[in-house]
Amino acid sequence: MISASYLPKKHGSYEAYDAAKNLYFWNELPYTVPSYISIDSEHKVLFAANYNTNAIHTFKMNDNYEITDSHTYPIEGHGPLVEQDHAHIHFARELPDGRLIVCGLGCDKLFIYDVDFDTAELTLKSAFDAKSGFGPRQLAIAKKTNYIYVLGELSSRVGVVEYNHETGKLERIADYSNIPEGYVGHSGSAAIRLSPDEKFLYISNRGHDSITVYKVLDGGKHLEKIQNIKTEGVFPRDFSLSKNGDFLLCANQNTNDLILFNRDTKYGYLSIAQTGIKHDACVRVLEATDFLA
């Protein structure tokens, strides 16, 4: 657990805007918490993306995982939408080559950093401009190819980019709508996962309240939408796949319930296995969990 003394102090910080209800939410805590954290256990470095402070925070740990040093990297910028008044950093995770990739939801950018694992310090390698108003929130990073799938929360779209290990830069390939064409209600995509074999991609949509299934084509370069299935609840914020890929567990935040899907591992399709599983805080589903073990 990160000690509050290491978290940036900020009063009355901007939290979120709900466009569906035209409501603003503010964090009145004396500090703000990260929107995403990841740990490099080998090098004892923790990375944190902080939505409210518009910054990346890195923490160096000793062999007992006690924090010994920390660094803060503020990011400036904004986008055209009301939710994009600041950079709003939402995601920070290592690439397979050890660089750090970061999502700036509010500034429509992806950042790639070199990491000094001895000190947990970062050096900017490259920056990639997403389309205006795209709102990059999370990534699904392929391990078998050089493709990265970029989830756009504000656009309800998914983009495919190719990562060049030698230059540390990204190249835009294509993007696709996660919700049906013609849908007029408010919706924002929330979570993204690749299947264990990297042949299918799954995305949750808050507002449309659904899971979209894509088939991965051309060695990862393109996607084909094959299914959009309702989550039988409201605001599906997160989900994950079981270890063997047979099941998908989705958390509906606003109705405080879970839904379990069967997953066809050959063709990728989802079907409902169980609904109405009540839970008090449906915000995060741990990755790589075998739900029926």
Image (spheres, rainbow, N blue to C red):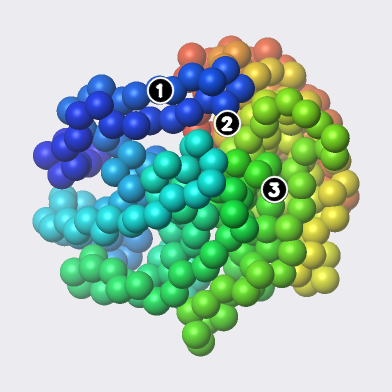
Callout in the foreground (1, 2)? 1
Q: Where residue 248 appears, x then y in whole percent?
A: 69, 36
Residue at 40 percent of width and 49 percent of height? 87
Within the image, what quadrant is residue 102 found in?
bottom left
Q: Is residue 7 visible?
A: yes
Q: Is residue 44 left or right of residue 85?
A: left
Q: Nearer the viewer, residue 60 or 35?
A: 35
Inter-mark Cα distance, 3 to 2? 15 Å
SS class, disc 2: strand
Within the image, what quadrant is residue 259 found in?
top right
Inter-mark Cα distance, 1 to 3? 24 Å
- Counting residues from the N terminus, which is met first, the one under dot 3 or under dot 2? 3
Q: Amino acid at mark 1?
A: Phe
Q: Is residue 97 left or right of residue 1?
A: right
Q: Where residue 219 appears, x then y in whole percent?
A: 78, 72
Question: Can you say whether 36 is above or below 64 in the image?
Answer: above
Residue 25: mark in rendering: 1
Q: Where residue 119 appears, x then y in whole percent?
A: 18, 69
- Counting residues from the N terminus, which is met first, the one under dot 1 or under dot 2? 1
SS class, disc 3: strand
Residue at 68 percent of width and 63 percent of height? 160
Within the image, what quadrant is residue 183 found in?
top right
Residue that protrudes farthest toward the front in the picture: 80
Residue that label 3 marks: 157
- Cβ–Cβ under 8 Å for marks 1 and 3: no
- Counting residues from the N terminus, which is met first, the one under dot 1 or under dot 3? 1
Residue 231: mark in rendering: none
Residue that label 2 marks: 237
Residue at 39 percent of width and 76 percent of height? 125
Assign the N terminus to one quadrant of the image.
Answer: top left
Q: Where residue 205 appears, x then y in whole percent?
A: 68, 34
SS class, disc 1: strand
